[in-house]
Each structure stands twice: as C-alpha cells, then as structure tokens.
Amino acid sequence: MRLERLQLRGLRCIEEIALAFEPGFNVLTGANGAGKTSVLEAAFLLSHGRSFRSGARDALVRRGASALSIFSTVRHDDGRLLRLGLGREGPRWEARVEAQDVPIGQLVRECAVVCFEPGSHALIAGAADERRRFLDWGVFHVEQEFLSTWRRYQRALKQRNSLLRAETMASDELMSPWEQELARCGTSIDLWRRSYLDALLPYLRGQSALLLPELGDVELRYRQGWPDGEELAAFLSAQRGRDQGRGHTTSGAHRADWSLSFVQAPQREHFSRGQEKLVALICLLAQARLDADHRGEWPIICLDDLASELDLSHQAAVVESLLAVPAQVLVTGTETPRPLLSSQARVFHVEQGQLTPLL
C-alpha cells in the first residue's frame, strides 16, 4: 500500500499542507522544528490511532487552532483507492473511510504504517506496555477478532478493579463472572500473541543477520502475564486478597511482556544505546516484512531523522534492503541521507510548516 496524497491541517506547527507522494522513497528535509516529523506522525496516527510522541494529546493541535484534521488517499496493491480521514476537536476523535463515519479500529485496519523514530529504543529499553502495543498491533492485523476480544478483556478488567477498590471484599458471586470473562478473553489473546511471535521470529533472525550479525543468533522470550501452567480464572480467584491490597489486578494478559536474547547479549542490559536502537529497528522491519507477507502488500515505512539515528553503514544497509522491495518509504532529515543521494527519491523541503517539492 502507499499514501498517494496527505493533507494536514492544524497539526503541531503545521497550519495546512498537502503532499503528493511517490511509490518508493520520499525524503522530507529541513531544519529541526520545521514540521518534518509531524508529517510522519500524521501517517502513524492514521495507522495506530495514537501518536508515537510522548506528551499531552492537546499538544497535537496547533497553537491557536481549535481542531486538527488529516486526510489521505491510500492505494492498495490490488488497485483499491480509499479516502481516509482522522480529525480531532476537543477531546473527541472522529474517523472516516470513504466519507463515512467509522470506528477508529476500522480506519486503522485500512492503513498500516511502521515507524522508526528517536523514541523507538523504548521498545527495547522501556516499559512492557510499549512492547505490548507493538505486539498487539501485529496481532490486530492478523486476527479479525482481536480488537473485540481485547475490548471485552478491558471491560472485565475495569469491573474487577472497581470491585477490588471497594471497602469490603466483593463476594464470589460478584467477582467470579468478571474473572471468568478475563480468563476467556485473556487466554485467546495469549494464544494469538504466541502464534504471532512464532511467525515473527524468522523475520527477526533475518533482520538481525543484516544489522547486528556480531551479536549472533536471536531468540524470543515471552511471559504471558500469569504463572505458566496456571489456569487464569483459578489464579485470579486465589489472588483476590493480594490484589485487593494493591487496588488492581496484578496478573493477566495486560501484564504480558516479551524480549529478545542474542548469543552475545543474552540480557537487554548488555546492549549499548546504539544497539538498543538497532534492535528496535530490527523488530520494526521484521514486523513490516511479516505484515507484507500476510497481507500481500507492504506497509508504509517511516524513518524519522535516519542520518542522526544510525551510522552511515547501517543507513546504507537499511536503504539497500528497502530499495529491493516494493515498499513506500518516508524519510526525514536535515538533509538527504547519503545512501539516498544516488537514488530516485522524491525530495521535499519543509520550512516552518510549509512544503516545497525539490525533486
């Protein structure tokens, strides 16, 4: 798939711009703070329903503006052309597909974007929720029932947590139905996650051999969020007293985590900061390749500030590997990365939220 057009209004420092992208590499250059990353952020918002940047959601809306809007046309490899839109005014998000109001989940299913940016190292060094988001985005695009099952799980979790915070212990009659629902949904989520990680592992090994061969072979470690061999409903029942003392549910699919282990770096603490970034990039590129094989078309690849995040040899390796596949790639930098100087990339210059095509 690829973005053919992207129109932004009121996002960050951007008042209004419209871009027409080419199928291959598209490079956005300009000074720091010019608005380049906001273009990638817009594509990511269409695909994830959230930003990859930290901070208050209110910061997404341009200062002085009352709303933001993102409109795009996405062409799939089967020839389908879809008009997608995402807007926010106040606290509410509104999503559209072909001018029809739809749930955000339906919008996200139509646009797949994988993004490597300066904060991506948190996928390796950060908290477990970052890794769960990565994992669940992949599962979402494979399993049609994942989103509805996850929402049911979250509803049951909220209800159990509310009972745990009551002044007196809730009766088994009140607590057990929510624990049973957590177990039903959590077990399905766990099975889907395991299946996805099993499918991802060969792609991780391929990207690792390309970018970090010195670390040796890679293995995946997965923790389901409750003790192995335990039935989740029974374990939740046994943990009620402990959970009531803490005021929340301490075990379940919402506590899952995963990590990578290399022969020469068996723990994440063994990675340098530069290696953390490369391992995160390995994960993202592996996910993109798995998604491409599953869908039959590549997701859109975003590489933010590539030249600052990777040394020249790794930039060249990434660019060469992506030039060999039919992926649309959006790259930002203060200038065109050296490995792309001899390619036929479309180049834009961004300055103070305004856009000028150069090539």
Image: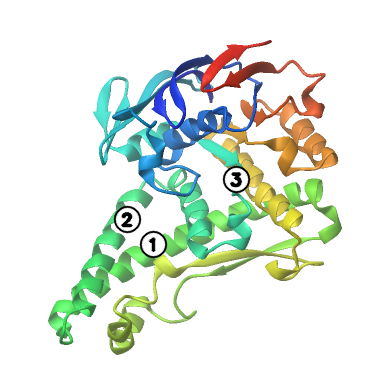
Taking 281 as reference, is 6 left or right? left
Tell me the crowding category of disc 3: few under 14, some 14 to 19, or many 20 or more residues within 10 angstroms, Cα based: many
Q: Which residue is mark 3?
A: 287
Using the rendered view, name the quadrant where residue 313 is placed. top right
Which residue has dot 1 on it? 188
Q: Which residue is mark 2?
A: 149
Compared across the picture, whether 227 is left or right of 247 comes to right
37 shown above or below 140 = above
- Of residues 309 and 195, the one nearer the viewer is 309
Whole-number angstrom distance, CA of label 2 to CA of label 1: 8 Å
Q: Residue at x 36, y 83 (%)?
A: 235
Q: Measure how far apart labels 2 and 3 are at the Cα level.
A: 22 Å
Above/below status of 175 relative to 51: below
Q: Position of residue 289 (x, y in %)?
A: 63, 40
The residue sitting at the front extreme is: 64
Q: Amino acid at mark 2?
A: Thr
**Which corner quadrant holds the C terminus?**
top right
Asked if the residue under mark 3 is in contact with the one under mark 1, i.e. CB atoms within 8 Å, the reply is: no
Q: How is the image coloured?
A: rainbow
* Amino acid type, callout 3: Gln
> Which of the two discs, 1 and 3, sits closer to the camera?
3
In space, the residues marked 1 and 3 are separated at their CA atoms by: 21 Å
Residue 4 has which mark? none
- Mark 1 or mark 3: whose residue is earlier in sequence: 1
Disc 2 or 3, which lies upstream in sequence?
2
